[in-house]
Amino acid sequence: MRKHVDFLVIGSGIAGLAFAIKVAKQGKVCIITKSTMDDTATSWAQGGIAAVMYTPDSFEKHIRDTLIAGDGLCNEKIVRLTIEESTGRIRELIKWGAKFDKTITGRYDLAKEGGHSEYRVLHHKDSTGREIENALLDQVKKHPNIEILENYFTIDIITQHHLNVEVNRRTPDITCFGAYVLNPRTKLVDTILSKVTLIATGGAGNVYSNTTNPLISTGDGISMVYRAKGIIENMEFIQFHPTSLYNPEEKPAFLITEALRGFGAVLKTREGKEFMHKYDARLSLAPRDIVARAIDNELKLNGDDFVGLDCRHLNKNELINHFPTIYAKCLSIGIDISKDMIPVVPAAHYTCGGIRVNEFGRSSILNLYASGECSSTGLHGANRLASNSLLESLVFSHRAGMDSVEIIKKTEICQEIPDWNAEGMVLNEEMILITQSMKEVQALMSSYVGIVRSNLRLQRAFDRLELLYRETEELYHKSILTVRLCELRNLINIGYLIIKSARARKESRGLHHSLDYPKIIPGGGINSDF
């Protein structure tokens, strides 16, 4: 199949859907999603979306909190424009149908999460992402200019490289002409040509063994842009959520939202002793990088598999009312959170780096935009402030949408692009080659490139990944393509990018903590060097 559209959107989370809604009046939109439309990281988001709504909160306070969490590596210009546009984007989201919890007085029931100095997190119980996803899907499905292709897997974006023009990362005019996409019905690769393409493919948590990300989060968009010679940055900053439910048989790990700690839950050892006072004056509501390292350190000190999150002192009715999903989930495995501590461990949660974009979501490749977790806007710096991610998606999809509407007016579809050549490819009949390599990638990344790193660990990870890369590329170039093979290839690319960035950073900063470059954070925790 060969298709022409004005806007190609790869991904159906908040970033992709918000962009599609913005541009649909201006041209034909095609949304590609590798699973079903609602199987996205957005749907899994529990906590909420941060925005300034009422006094005593202010833009300046939210800006300051974001900069502090980012440990000096945020782009202050980007932080400021994101926060200052936050209220307007939230009002638009509400207009599209998203409903957030309110108090009996009619004001929004704002939560407070780690790193925030004020109550500013809007939520819908503990399933905020699902509420937002459903509202956006309702808008998308009823728009006549938007086509949705479910279970289609995007293999690569198309550039002049596919016209046999040599490009590298210094080539100033690399241009995106669309994408090659694996059709689930025909098992063939379709060519979708576009004037503008948006990458909104989410994160890469499945490069690790334990992650809160859905199984679809395999870094596809970041890897595609990297192979197309686009600029990728800050991949060393992988945020581990401090509190995923300890349930080793379950994948992905069930997230215990930070909002529960904002509600009053307290981190304790298995023996019931509080420990966060040893690490940070903000205790259980310190920024995520500090809390994750603190838990990691306690596990190593005590030889335990998990720590506890204690809700037993909280009002049971209010606890269940605010966190019904968490209460039901824990109860399903024999844990009554009103009587038992919740066993929790850190899990890979969010990719702070990614495809470098400017303030309009433009990547280094012409006619190619990126928004959401796959992008690197400069908002998060070395560590993402809780609940800033959904906000970032809204702001940058809006900006990218407004910018790209002007781009399509002066852009034509490139008709010279060849269709995918699968001549000579054979069916791989040994899936064990893919599944075992996938396990190896996840194991080495978890063991050597996790919460705490060292030069020796990074070198070992790189050496082993290099072998897996060579084996997988050989398999890829002779096989009829499958989703699992492409995902493996993408995860190897992601692992390489994380290791490369981590080796280049000769310091401990935010989410990247190296034993070879210990550091005490000025004005930070009581004992931040651990």
Image (spheres, rainbow, N blue to C red):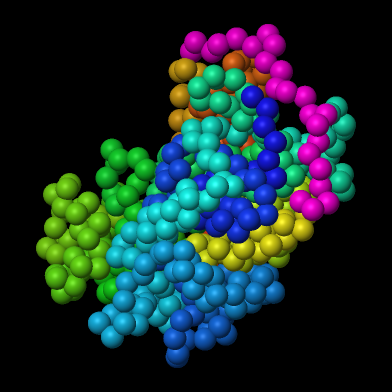
| Residue 207 x/y as whole percent | 51, 40
Q: Quadrant of residue 518?
A: bottom right
- Specify the quadrant that holds the N terminus: top right
Is residue 276 left or right of 337 when viewed as pictured? right
Q: Quadrant of residue 15?
A: bottom right
Is 429 magenta? The answer is yes
Residue 128 to residue 67: above or below: above
32 and 109: which is toward the camera: 32
Q: Residue at x 81, y 47 (%)?
A: 411
Q: Residue at x 65, y 74 (%)?
A: 81
Is residue 214 left or right of 424 when viewed as pictured? left
Q: Residue at x 45, y 90 (%)?
A: 55
Overall secondary structure of the magenta stretch? loop
User: In this rendering, does residue 206 appear at all?
Assistant: no
30 and 466: which is toward the camera: 30
Is residue 352 left or right of 305 when viewed as pictured? right
Residue 450 to residue 431: above or below: below
Instruction: Read off the magenta span.
Output: 408-430
| Residue 474 x/y as whole percent | 65, 18
Is 356 magenta? The answer is no
| Residue 334 x/y as whole percent | 13, 49
Residue 518 to residue 50: above or below: above
| Residue 200 x/y as whole percent | 58, 49
